[in-house]
Image (cartoon, rainbow, N blue to C red):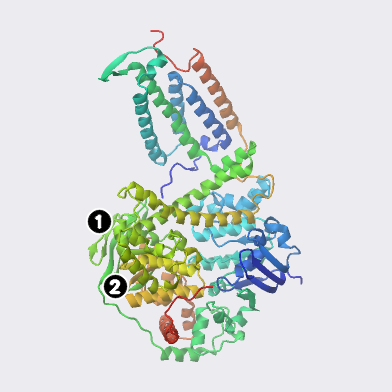
Amino acid sequence: MEPIIEFRNFTFKYKSQKEPTLYDINLKIYPGEKVLIAGPSGSGKSTLAHCVNALIPCSFPGKTQGELIVKGMTPKEEGVFGMSKTVGTVLQDTNGQFIGLTVAEDLAFALENDAIPQDEMKKRVMEAAKVTDMTAFMHHSPSDLSGGQKQRVSMGGVLVDDVEILLFDEPLANLDPATGKSTIALIDDIMKQKNVTVLIIEHRLEDVLYKDVDRIIVVGEGRIVSDTTPDELLASDILIREGIREPLYVTALKHTGAKIRPEDHPQHIETMDVSKYVSGVREWFESTRSEHPVLTTPPALEVKDLKFSYTEGEPVLQGVSFTIRKGEMLSLVGRNGAGKSTLSSLICGFIKPDAGEILLNGEDISPLSIKERGERIGLVMQSPGQMISKPMIREEVGLGLAVRGVPEDEINKRVDETLKICGLYPFRNWPVGALSFGQKKRVTIASILVMQPEIMILDEPTAGQDYRHYTEVMEFLKKLNEDMGLTIMMITHDMHLMLEYTDRALVLTDGTLIADAAPSEILTDESIADRAYLKKTSLYDLAVKCGIEPPSEFADHFISYERKLRENESRETEASGAQTGGITTGEADS
Amino acid sequence: MTRLISYEKKDTWIDRLSGFTKLVFFLLWCLTSALTFDTRMLLTMIAISFSIFAMSHTDWRQVSSVFKAVLFFMCVNLFFIFVFAPYQGCEIYGSRTELAHLFGDVYITREQLFYEFNVMIKYFTIVPAVFVFLVTTDPSELAASINKVGVPYTFAYSFAIALRYIPDVQDDFSRIRNAQEARGIEMSAKAKLISRIKNIASIIFPLLFSTMDRIDVVSNAMELRGFGKKKRRTWYSYRKLKRNDYIVLVLTVLFMAAALIITYADGSRFYNPWTNS
């Protein structure tokens, strides 16, 4: 069979960069295949995909060498328009790519541009809406849709043309776990209905593997590191080496000392043959213990019966109460629109509650202004770009102090201290623009930390980051929490984050707190996970399959074990750092 | 986020008219109102304007805050007309009937009051028409219909796309402002004007950068789906002109012609109630 996509000795270098981003790629993809392209940020996986739809080199200029043939065409010559008839691309930003003012218009966009007569257009739009199950929302505007629905519209928008290749650029990045799961199911459906070739670029491997994938291509530093079936890949140690997170059940099995074999089909936990591993898993479970540190510190933040609505009769929060203790690190989870942002806006004082009270260290903060609260409750926004407003790192970090009229000596002293804590001291005189994404994130955290808040709220601290950056940010926050006793609340829908780094999670659904418990408990309780648009962790499935009683404790043991591993690791690196005389300077990011 | 006067689908005959018809009506209506100072004409137009407003089933809540702002602006306007040209009315109507003495040599005259009354009712002829136009016109359908009458589609579309992303930028703005305010950058009236202007930079820059990122995504997404590929494009929401559209267009033109003939019949665009007395 002829491949539908073929890279032959393909090299690509961006105009703005010295080194090529892709080196000597040789890759064949056949019609009807479903291929996952995985790799950490900056590995070149997105670059690879954008060569197929000709965004590279048409929109992002650069130099190509070697050959790329897509369905007998050379993308470079056909241009983005030419390729769009064959390759349908769904971008990561579900909101940004929604161009029409309503669902129907957005679905029609490609047809409009192709000057298709209106009658035929309406028919094809209706078909695409049926495939993506959006017929009930035809006249809705994007602001009335959830992220998952917008993504369905994006898919429909490329399906109106009879494309043969569907390209998904990190389709799960902005979705909650349950919506991500249904997206993967939909992709699978479309593939079967339309008989197309599917390319998915994603680093959230476990979520993509919810449905069968034919092949996984791992990209690392611009080269193809591995090109094999999921079963083979999961049995190897390539993922760990390349900084991609393995499915949790695979990691857990490896912790038990098991050597995973491809013939056991580790692609899905539901269908995996675990018979060989049962005894090992049980032994490991018996030999490990879970630890639940019980905090008895006084409360830092108390929220009592908080109620709020933007328009009367449509409550966003209906009587939410909880207490956060000093030095606690916890997560606030729930689907989009559950009221998470509203809750943090209320705590920061951007909006006023209709009823209820918020106490900080036992003191009612309702009379405090936004600015006054800002000194005690720090808010770190999701994207560093939303906060950084000064060109130089020192200025940016010192901004909060400068506007409060703190004397300059004092500012300098505190900024230096904070930069040291954040591992940014070596870069103190750099322009912000020269930093990597992860470092910018730390700059925004530093600019809040410098004000010495009593509690810090972070909105999606790890959104859109790969495993390595995720670990970097989270370990840093954990250090702040442990060393400085900083109270941290994170708004997230990253299940790994809540499981691995927090001992407690608040689950918000439709404006009510439906659970306040250990993450391992929440993620093993199907009804709560469903209502909050989370997903039951695969650790639970593994435990059930191995007959562990009670299965929910298995996740607990796993987390405690992992934390200990990480602690040992960081102790080792600190020790070796001390030997070479280096302070933790925050390694220069590539 | 409260959305001020924006399109809301309602199944009225006005809603079903083509955007082109509504645009022509709106432009001619405003032109007529701007030209005429004939009180009889203006009062007729108010009557028509308000009945159209009623027929459009426009929700008062949607427009009330803008209406209040317009009222305020109108009062300021009327006040300043009086301050700078207290005898404008006398000049226009060629007589001077003093009603009350204010101070110095400033008098309130009947002519001035009548003149300002005319300015005021002009506002009321236009305002409901503007609201009806904005609230009942589907922006993409309008873009489609102005493209059909010869305006290049890239131009027509740019306006639809602006409407699409304005709410997003507004959201970004309030999010960034909140976060910066929490860091201590005061934007409320408490801060001094100069520091407020300086502080705006700390909101504008992040907003600018996030908007530029958005533009990148949007333009890539548009290109990927073939925008600008062909000289011509069709429109999902285009509606052919129907019988009602032609009726409205003809009536509008007739009305304007009649209004202007009546207004200028006596050689002046002002109606003078005192000429015959």
Compare residues A312 and A344 and report the one nearer the observer.
A344
As helix, strand or loop, the secondary structure at mark 2 comes to loop
Is residue B60 in view from this perspective? no
Label 2 – label 1 distance at C-alpha: 22 Å
Compare residues A430 and A532 and report the one nearer the observer.
A430
Residue at point 50% right, 70% down? Answer: A465
As helix, strand or loop, the secondary structure at mark 1 comes to loop
Q: Are labels 2 and 1 on one chain?
A: yes
Q: Given the current orientation, which residue lies at the most extreme front position?
A: A409
Q: Callout 1: 10 Å neighbours few (<14), some, many (20+)?
A: few
**Rendered-image quadrant of the C terminus of chain B:** top left
Chain letter belonging to callout 2 = A
Name the mark on residue A233.
Answer: none
Which residue bears the numbered disc 2? A326
**Could you say where residue A15 lies in the image, as x and y percent from the top left?**
64, 63
Amino acid, disc 1? Pro
In the visual, does A90 lie left or right of A511? right
For marks 2 and 1 on the same chain, the one whose residue lies earlier in the sequence: 2
**Could you say where residue A79 lies in the image, as x and y percent from the top left?**
70, 57
**Could you say where residue B255 lies in the image, as x and y percent from the top left?**
53, 22
- B271 in relation to B119, above or below: above
Which residue bears the numbered disc 1? A367
- A21 in relation to A317, above or below: below
